[in-house]
Image (cartoon, grey):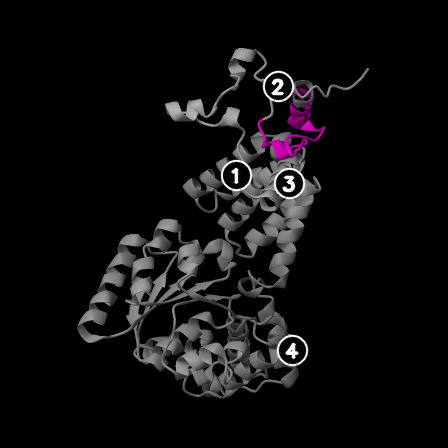
Amino acid sequence: MLPNASMDLFDHKEDREKAGAPLSERMRPRRAADLVGQEHLLAKGGVLARAIAEDRIPSMILWGPPGCGKTSLARTLAVESQAELVIFSAVLSGVPELRKVLEAASEKKKLRGARTILFVDEIHRWNKAQQDALLPYVERGSVILVGATTENPSFAVNSALLSRARVFKMEPLPSSDVRALLDRALADHDRGLGGLGVRAEADALDAIAEHAHGDARRALDVLELSARDAHSRGAVIDRALVAGALASPTLRYDKSGEEHYNVVSAFIKSMRGTDPDAAIYYLMRMLDAGEDPLFVLRRMIIFASEDVGNADPQAIQVAIAADASFRRLGMPEGLFPIAQCCTYLASTVKSNASYEAFTRAREDVNDHGALEVPLHLRNAPTKLMKEMGYGEGYRYPHAEGGHASGVSYLPSELAERRYYEPKDVGFEARIKARLAKLRGEGTKE
């Protein structure tokens, strides 16, 4: 499908059903009643069910794992509200294309009162400027935004956009719902696999549903592989045949399922534990399974600051350079700087002192509020401010030789607080010794 495609759910029925279209695409629900799962949203009395019934669909962010029905829900919302659906890829399209779509939707609304649902897939991949371009159109109601993301919207979507859209958390589908979809696909002669005439053993379908981990797309793709294999051999879909389909490299990883988070956790903890062998192993598990390299690089940049910090100030430069190198090289050569960064971060000295410092400082900011800045630190650009004592008594550190004036810079209520406590490792050990000397905290012989 093109990055930006204006469509009605039924207009492209033939396209979805043509040879080569995946079963998961052909079996997309036609109406809201065909959707499975998400009972908290779609059951009678649910927030989205009420919105559909009352024809007052709001702009929204759908947050959930792959295969839980985000795209299918957007399509059915367009059908139920008789709105035009425009599918827009956050990965493939930028602001110029977006503005054309938004202006066209705005004109249709003014001239004909026609509504447009703008479905933005992977909206978390857009930067601030791209997300901000949506704001006036969403605010005026020129479009109904339906953004889809697998990332926590609190971190991935601008607060200004979040304030104008409802966030709906979508859950992985229960295995019972996945199993119902499999039965439906096997029996459907129009869009499903009914024409193949294959039979499936119950425990084989149970195995597919169980191993899908709530991902309907993955389950249907496994079923299709199994069904076509069974049809070509004149066999029955059994557990052995399903096991072969599940072993397919293209089906072995769910980038937002529990195993994803387990592997990411193991990756971070291996680097923190200074085990480069384990770190590179988990790195390759993620990348080989199709994880977004930019996600991995982002995690390593965070790690370089949070877990290495000033013990090795070069670490964050290595991480940033790896990110820049990957963006320039692409795949597969971009894997080299990623692997180099991983082994460097895992092998170098570690300190979380900077992280602990900002945590302590933030606690005091929250506990004490906006304390008065000491007079000698205040700016005094006017005569009145100088007469009020602003800047009086300030000592210029560069004129003091050691760049330490011996005066307190914190508000008086916090004068004795210590936020940054360097660790006695790596370069930070030198920082610790210097600060101790400047603070008059030298060790006694």
The CA distance from mark 1 to mark 2 is 45 Å
The answer to whether residue 136 of the structure is visible from this angle is yes
Q: Quadrant of the N terminus?
A: bottom left
Name the residue that disc number 2 marks. 406
- Residue occupying the point 57% across, 63% down: 254
Name the residue that disc number 1 marks. 337
Helix, strand or loop for disc 1: helix
User: Badge 1: few (under 14), some or many (20 or more) residues near its Cα, within 10 Å?
Assistant: many
- Magenta residues, start to end: 409-434
Where does residue 255 sit, x and y in percent of width and height? 55, 60
Name the residue that disc number 4 marks. 239
Amino acid type of disc 3?
Answer: Arg
- Residue occupying the point 56% across, 57% down: 289
Amino acid type of disc 4?
Answer: Arg
Disc number lying in front (3 or 4): 3
Where does residue 153 sit, x and y in percent of width and height? 49, 59
* Vertical comparison of 108 with 392: above or below: below
Helix, strand or loop for disc 4: helix
Name the residue that disc number 3 marks. 360
* Vertical comparison of 366 with 16: above or below: above
